[in-house]
Amino acid sequence: MEQQRTGTPSRQPRPQAPLSQQTPLSKGALIEGTSVYRVTARPGGPGQPDAPQRAGKRPGRQGPPVVAALRRLPNPRLTGLGAGLFACTLMLVIGSLDQLLFDGSAIMYGVLFLPVSALTGFWVRGADLVTAPISVPIAFAVGLVPITGGSAGTGGSGGIGVEVMAVVTALAVQAGWLYGGTLVAGLIATVRKIRLMTTRRRSRRPSVPPRRA
């Protein structure tokens, strides 16, 4: 009888599941042979925001405290008449206090006149900037009335003519302070006028569309 030859059965490959049924791998994983490696992206890489220290960005520095204090001050917009009344009233109060506390000191009156001139130039509105250098000398003359002896209705013995001559004499003596305050108001008004004109030119200039490559 012939003996049946029995050999070792050949190993057949196991069927693999299709790719759609395999377990999905997480993003950033690499397959090499039968091992799975995860790749961790470094901070600051592509697609991730850089740290502020690596990017070298620093928070914006604030201005000096003087500028911050000036920005917190009130910034009204007065008409030409309102700016003139403001300057005249303030200088009349300053003149009265100067006569009461400092016996009509010309230096004290002139020093206090400069900031009043600056405020008048800053607070007048853009349409009435021309009135700032005109209102300031009038306010200076009004403030000299209590210093030179008061108005005619306060019991002056010389009358209105004497009071007017006293004010004119004081204006001639303190002409330096008068010109200085007027110059301050004029410079501030001129700078503001130039800035307004520049802003209007930029707003009227048509925007040019970008050229296509």
Image: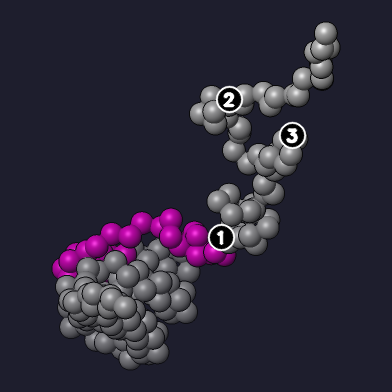
As shown in the figure, which amino acid type bears the numbered disc 1? Gly
Q: CA distance from mark 3 to mark 2?
A: 15 Å
Residue at image coords 67%, 23%: 14
At label 3, counting other C-alpha atoms closer than 10 Å, the crowd grade (few under 14, some 14-19, many 20 or more) is few
Q: Is residue 126 left or right of residue 51?
A: left
Q: Secondary structure at mark 2?
A: loop
Please say if 41 is above or below 14: below
Q: Nearer the viewer, residue 194 or 183?
A: 194
Q: CA distance from mark 2 to mark 1?
A: 59 Å
Read off the residue under disc 3: 34
Label 3 or label 2, whichever comes before in sequence order: 2
Residue at image coords 43%, 56%: 72
- Residue 17 - label: 2
As shown in the figure, which amino acid type bears the numbered disc 3? Thr
Question: Is residue 74 within the magenta segment?
Answer: yes
Query: Dots 3 and 2: beta carbons under 8 Å?
Result: no
Read off the residue under disc 1: 60
Q: Secondary structure at mark 1?
A: loop
Residue at image coords 25%, 69%: 124
